[in-house]
Image (spheres, grey):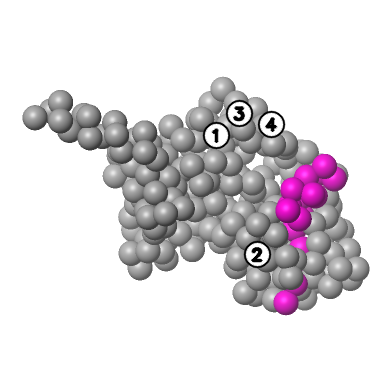
Amino acid sequence: MKIMVINPNSSIAMTEHIAHVLNKIKGCDMELTVTHTPDVPPAIESAYDEALCVPGVLKLIEKANREGYDAAILACFSDPGLEACREISNILVTGIEETSMHVAAMMGAKFSILTMNQERVPAKVREGRRFKLEHSMASARPLGMSVAETDSEPERAREQIMRVARQAVECDGAEVIILGCAGMAGYAEGISEELGITCIDPTSVTLKITEALVAAGVKHAKRGFFATPPSIRRAAVTTKKAAK
């Protein structure tokens, strides 16, 4: 089984951090590639950053399809370009935000998302509605740290995660906490036990869900919502005719 994990930002340090965490939990028969998108922001902290990353992400999805991968994962808690990726892909594409939010809704009555800054809170609330999970979502709370800081300052990040997670549990009624950034990969350990809740590391959970879906032969439908774009279909027909 071959799976490509795409860090949509350009941070090599974060890419290596994600790879370190995922290589410890991947299946023994899995060939795992963790890569990043060059020439884009080193962190995704706004809709603008997301938009800049999408073209590079699409190129990596095309590469995964050409090189025989079984699935690709978008390792960013905003799933930049996820729908477009599925349109152009014949292999399974998953995003850590969509996947972890649906898993969280299964694991408890209410979940809270820990996001980076206050400005991103409305986006997380909106995405809960988009996934039809607003009744399962207790809150979105900011850590007050940048994406780069969560990766470079692990001890401070762990302290902030614990503090804000405790607020979500005690004030918002959260039973499940989602660490809403790929830069927090590997930080879930210990939080569940101390707070008596379930803590989800989206990147790790999405890898195992994706692995299971590939093994079960399940991928997104190519009819309707994720149908191949007409321009790509026309180009394929033209190429086929020219080759005859």
Is residue 63 visible in the rendered structure shown here? Answer: no
Q: Is 61 above or below relative to 215?
A: above
Q: Calculate the distance from the C-alpha at mark 4 to the C-alpha at mark 2.
A: 25 Å
In the rendered image, residue 205, in percent from the top left (x then y), is placed at: 56, 61
Whether pointer 1 and pointer 3 mark residues with C-beta atoms closer than 8 Å, the reply is yes
15 relative to 212 in the view: left or right: right
Q: Which residue is mark 2?
A: 132
| Mark 3 closeness class: few <14, some 14–19, many ≥20 residues within 10 Å | some
**Circle 1: residue type:** Val
In the rendered image, residue 56, in percent from the top left (x then y), is placed at: 50, 30
**Circle 2: residue type:** Lys
Q: Quadrant of residue 241?
A: top left
Q: Which residue is mark 1?
A: 54
In the rendered image, residue 101, in percent from the top left (x then y), is placed at: 64, 62
| Magenta stretch bounds | 109-126
Q: Is residue 124 magenta?
A: yes
Q: Calculate the distance from the C-alpha at mark 2 to the C-alpha at mark 1.
A: 24 Å
151 relative to 226 in the view: left or right: right
234 or 138: nearer the eye?
Answer: 234
Q: Which residue: 51% across, 47% down? A: 83
In the rendered image, residue 105, in percent from the top left (x then y), is placed at: 65, 71
Whether pointer 4 and pointer 3 mark residues with C-beta atoms closer than 8 Å, the reply is yes
